[in-house]
Image: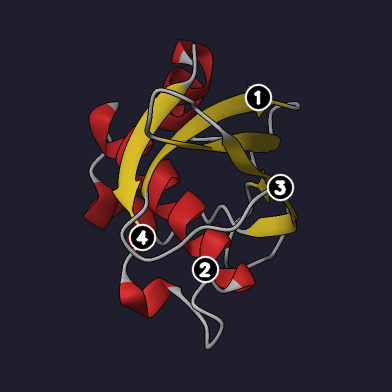
Amino acid sequence: MPFTYNRTIRFQDTDAAGVVYFANVLSICHEAYEESLAIAGINLKTFFSHSGTAIPIIHTSVDFFAPMFCGDKLLIHLTPQELGDTKFEISYEIVADSSSQVKLAKALTRHVCINPITRTRTPFPEEIVAWLRKS
């Protein structure tokens, strides 16, 4: 079941043309990811500062279907998928929060779990396994 995050586009998200700057879509997706972890009971301060494990993003992509403007209300539907014991990806569908539910963009982030000292892959912490399997 996907997690849904509500977000309003702010002026700071936009470029000189008045639409969301392309790289900011990934930032918005990351906000949704963080919120889904928090809702699952994961302490974000501990998770992002845990010295024994890091889960960096190794691949991203974004496709745009319609512009997003300051003040637009969005729904970001996030669906994680486990790709083994050291890798997962998250699919994001960004739609207008209106009766039309117009699809505005889709994005993907791929993550890998590593030991930050040795930079070698390591299995996910239990809390991430639980988060992945809830979704």
Camera-nearest label, 2 or 1: 2
Q: Which residue is mark 4?
A: 9
Q: Identify the secondary structure beneath mark 2.
A: loop
| Circles 4 and 2 in contact, beta carbons < 8 Å | yes
Determine which of the numbered discs, if any, sits on residue 71 in the image.
none
Percent position (x, y) of residue 6?
31, 39
Percent position (x, y) of residue 119?
69, 64
Q: Identify the secondary structure beneath mark 1.
A: strand
Outermost residue toward the bottom in this view: 16
Q: Which residue is mark 2?
A: 20
What is the CA distance from the residue labelled 4 to the residue labelled 3? 16 Å
Outermost residue toward the front in this view: 100
Observer-nearest of 116 and 77: 77
What is the CA distance from the residue labelled 3 to the residue labelled 2? 12 Å
Kind of residue at disc 2: Val
Q: Residues within 10 Å of mark 3 (few under 14, many from 20)?
A: few
What is the CA distance from the residue labelled 4 to the residue labelled 2? 8 Å
Q: Identify the secondary structure beneath mark 4.
A: loop
Q: Which residue is mark 3?
A: 65
Q: Which residue is mark 1?
A: 81
Relative horizontal placement of residue 88, taking residue 94 as reference (left or right): right
In the rendered structure, which disc, 1 or 4, sits on the residue that comes first in sequence?
Answer: 4
**Point 56% across, 82% down: residue:** 17
Observer-nearest of 2 and 53: 2
